[in-house]
Every structure is written in structure tokens, then in C-alpha cells.
Image (cartoon, grey):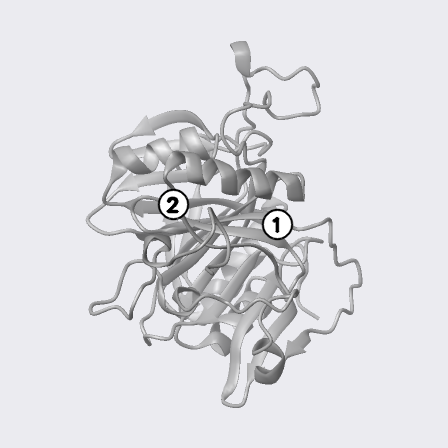
Amino acid sequence: MPPLHDIAHLAHVELFTHKPEESLDFFVRYLGMTENGTSGDSVSLRAWDDYENTTIKLTAAARPGVGRTNFRASTPEALQRRVAAIEATGLGRGWEDGDPGYGPVYVFTDPDGHEMGVYYETEWYRPTGDLVPALKNQAQAYPGRGVSVRRIDHINFLGVDVVANRDFARDTLGGMVTEQIVLDDGVAGSWTTFTNKGYDAVWTRDATGTSGRLHHLSFAVDSRDDIIRAADLALEHGVHIETGPHKHTIQQSFFLYVWEPAGNRIELDNPAARLVFAPDWQPIDWSAEERAKGQAWGLQTISTFHTHGTPPVEPEQEETRDSDLEGDAWGAAR
């Protein structure tokens, strides 16, 4: 059994963009997130019901991709236990001051080189003015703007060695593996939870053999209707819809994948309240034959889902955009 719940949850993620103004507009106007401060080349953005100050840190950079992924520990003692475990792997980098609103962060990488941090001390978000909610058990007033994403849901990393990353997440960070893709040549994807959700962090095989890339960052909405509305809003806002709305076979969430202006893939996700309570849960394995059937409703996964990641790899495999397909307003091509 892994040391469950020393990591309380996925906290906040840094995204790099080489189109900072366009990306900021996407997150504020389309996703409906709220700006909550700036520091240097970075803007802090929050989803309306995340209790901490920052959901994502959007940072101007030469190329898109993922910066530091931060996890909050459940107690100061849990933080020290996870730091000791990380140091024993040789992947630790040491302590740094946290971003505004956070205490000291222990910085490390996963085996694939993705930068991560773990911390405990934090400040809860305190809304003011029009951002004060009517219900005091809600972090912020509902923005009523764009998709109005409620919270960060999960992150999907691309990696060279899924097994090494899976084992690190389980044995060192204390996650539980809930589902996997197991092909003839080994494990190609691993879904890991630190909470009672089906998954908080995912590692899938990078088809280009490149380390340290991002597949997607996901935000949760309240209902399937919100996913449908997100597709209509994407059409209105000129946002590229990669695929969906569909229902995933793995984890059963209802989803829409879009690309923000810098090319980072963003998922809008309704996980349908599927929770894992069993402390002795055993991973559900999906074979190549089962995955070849496509998504839960038999729809095939678009080719870019297997080739596109950030930062891009040159030359990157063919990327098909909606404008290249003859189809309906959104969804499957004819």
C-alpha cells in the first residue's frame, strides 16, 4: 500500500506561453478565470471555487509547455515525510520560497524531468467586493463569464518511461494507481490519485520519445451541460476544438479538448462524481484491443491526441485542425 494522503491534492500549475496576451484572454474571457495578481512575467489566475489563491500561474516564455506543478501536503509532518522520500530517490533540488500566498516549497522532478514542488503553508483566498459569494462555504462568487471553470481537476504529463513515473508517484509521493493502459510492449498510461477522485495526475507515453512535455491540463465544471456550452462558446470565441464532447472509457468523464492560443491542450471535464473509496483498490488495466475501440461511445480518438504536446517537437507529426476538416459546427467531421 502507498502512503496514502500525505499529498492532500494537486494545488496549482505553471503554464508557459509565447503568446501571453492571447493566452490570458483565453483563460479570463473563455474559461472565466479570475486574475489574482502579477509577478514579473507571470499572472496568477484562479478558478472560482479553488480555496487557494492561485490555480494556474501563466508565465510568458519562449515556448509553451508546463513549468512547475505544485502539490500541497496534508500536514507539516506529511511534508517532511514526502521530502525525505524524494531526497532518497536523488530527484530533489531543494527548498525555495513559494509564490505569493504560499510558504516554502520543496522542489524536485519526476523521473521524466517535469519540475514539481510540494509545500504545506498557504493562505486561503479572501474575496472582496463583487467577488464575495452569497454562500460563505464557497470560495468566490460564480463569475458567470465564459465556461466558468470551477476548479483544477488533473494534469496529464507526457513521459518516456511511464512505469518509472508511475512508481515514483505511487511509492515516493504516495498516490494510488487507479487505471492503466497496458499494451503488448508495456504500460503506456497510468492514472494516479492522491485523493478520493479517480485521478489527479496522469503519465502517458510520449510518442516522440521526448521527456518533460505536457499532454493537457484539466479543469472541472459542474455538469455535462457545461461541457456542451463550452463547445458552443469555443465556436463563438474562435477557440480550436481538438475533439469532443465525448465520454472517456478510462475514468468515464465527459470531456472537451481545446487548445489555448499558445498550443497548450486544455480539457474541460465533468467527472460525473466518480470516486474511489476502496483503500485496497486494484488498478483497472485496459488492453490495446480495448483501447482500439475508441471512447466509451465507440468514437475514435483524433490522431493529434497521440502526437500533439507542448513544447512542440520539431518536426512534429501532422496536426489536423478543425479548419482542415469538413464537418459540423463542432464535433465529428463528416
Horizontal arrangement in the rendering, residue 266 relative to residue 176 (left or right): left
Q: Residue at x 34, y 57 (%)?
A: 321
Q: Residues within 10 Å of mark 2 (few under 14, many from 20)?
A: many
Q: Which residue is mark 1?
A: 77
Residue at horizontal 43%, vertical 77%? 161
Which percent across, then down, holds residue 137?
71, 24
8 left or right of 316 in image: right
Evaluate whether residue 103 shows in this view.
no
Secondary structure under badge 2? Answer: strand
Instruction: Name the N-terminal-most of marks 2 and 1.
Output: 2
Looking at the image, which is closer to me, 125 or 29? 29
Residue at image point 58% right, 71% down:
294
Q: How crowded is the residue under tag 1: few (<14 C-alpha within 10 Å), some, or many (20+)? A: few
Q: Which of the 4 image quarters holds residue 143?
A: top right
Q: Position of residue 114 (x, y in %)?
A: 38, 61
As shown in the figure, which amino acid type bears the numbered disc 1? Glu
Q: Which residue is at 46% across, 46% downward?
A: 329
